Image (tube, rainbow, N blue to C red):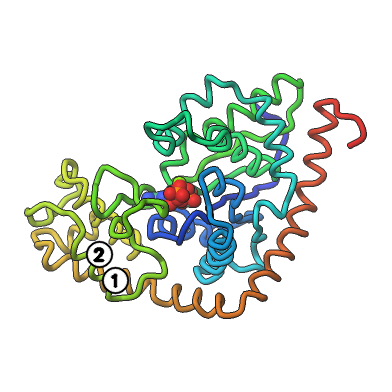
Amino acid sequence: MSDTTFTPRVFSGIQPSGGLTLGNYLGAIKRFVSMQEEDYETIYCMVDLHAITVWQDPKSLVHNTRELAAGFIASGISPEKSILINQSAVPEHAQLGWIFNCVARMGWMQRMTQFKDKAGKNAQNASLGLFGYPALMAADILVYHATHVPVGDDQKQHLELTRDIAAKFNHDYGVDFFPMTEPVIEGAATRVMSLRDGSKKMSKSDPSDASRINMTDDADTIAKKIRKAKTDPDALPSEAKGLEDRPEARNLVNIYAALADMSVDQVLAQYGGAQFGTFKPALADLAVAKLAPISGEMARLMDDVTEIDKVLAKGALQAREITAPILKKTYEIVGMVGS
Ligand code: ATP
Ligand code: MG
């Protein structure tokens, strides 16, 4: 157990690997906004170095990075209250990432399910970066000595690895330097599933656009995707227990609950006995009501990107005030001369 006390500090990131999805919003961004209002320093990041672990067209990467920043701001992340950065603009992330490549063990990395999912059958052809991704993610977090990381359920294993890396570094060098970061995985929608397949996570990089709701989808598109979402023929149950073997139904109810800030039981108290013909349009209306103001503001911000670029430039300066001393100290601990 650590005796050192660390400043309560939140770090989290999202990849500019496509457009934002409802999964990113409910599993991550909504929590980012609420934690910003609590007693934490908050740092939120577009992780472009992670995005290029799979091929990104350079022009799209530029667009997606700015649009992601616009999504953060439009969702309520304030550049006055939080530090907003693009990962590659703060070089200490990659520098600490290298140190952690030398701390993490091959055996640990080989157990990471995200690599297996993303590399698929053709793992020999995956990039080395995709394999090393979790060590860079540990560096993203620990280069701020972040104590709390709000993420979706799919990132739980990477956060356990982050703790393993911190513990091994502290142990190997006989220091109490990196904190044991706490994952914050909370809410009704920590794992939003694909609308086409209730066993698959909704992802911005899924080749099927019908599998997800994009933050920038218009009202008609959202309604159509929800109407076409895979479900079963039964009516909704009146208690959460009744959703246990119905992944698609459970997913839609979870989405409703998270969007409405209600519990699953409250949603079922209202809709128990209803058919999807009733529930789906209600869900679509709710999703449009919540997402339309955000996508409208995103579009406005994207009209003139100078504001976004200014926010990110300021964020990088603020971030480096935290990361530069932590990296310098790390290099000293490791024994690097001249740092
Ligand atoms: P990609 O397909 O490129 O991996 P992604 O949609 O998984 O994109 P990430 O940038 O990898 O998005 O993850 C950003 C954050 O969003 C993470 O905290 C992750 O846990 C969360 N997240 C991603 N997908 C979901 C989901 N379906 N439900 C809840 N949270 C999610
Ligand atoms: Mg992902």
- In this rendering, position of residue 320 left or right of residue 204: right
Residue behind mark 2: 225
* Residue 338 falls in image quadrant: top right
**Kind of element beneath mark 1:** helix
Residue behind mark 1: 221
Residue at left offset 37%, top offset 51%: 206
x then y, percent, for residue 205: 41, 52
Q: Please tell me how many numbered marks the rendered image carries.
A: 2
Is the Cβ of the residue at disc 1 closer than 8 Å to that at disc 2?
yes
Q: Residues within 10 Å of mark 1 (few under 14, many from 20)?
A: some
Query: Is the CB atom of the residue marked by disc 1 within 8 angstroms of ligand 1's nearest atom?
Result: no
Q: How far apart are marks 1 and 2 (CA)?
A: 6 Å
- In this rendering, position of residue 314 left or right of residue 201: right
Residue at left offset 53%, top offset 32%: 131
Closer-to-camera residue (257/269) = 257
Residue at left offset 62%, top offset 28%: 165
x then y, percent, for residue 223: 24, 71
**Kind of element beneath mark 2:** helix
Rendered view: 118 above or below 2? below
Closer-to-camera residue (112/206) = 206
Closer-to-camera residue (75/9) = 75
Residue type at tag 2: Lys
The quadrant in which the N terminus is found is top right
Closer-to-camera residue (189/248) = 248
Query: Which labelled disc corresponds to residue 253?
Result: none
The quadrant in which the C terminus is found is top right
x then y, percent, for residue 323: 76, 47
Residue type at tag 1: Thr
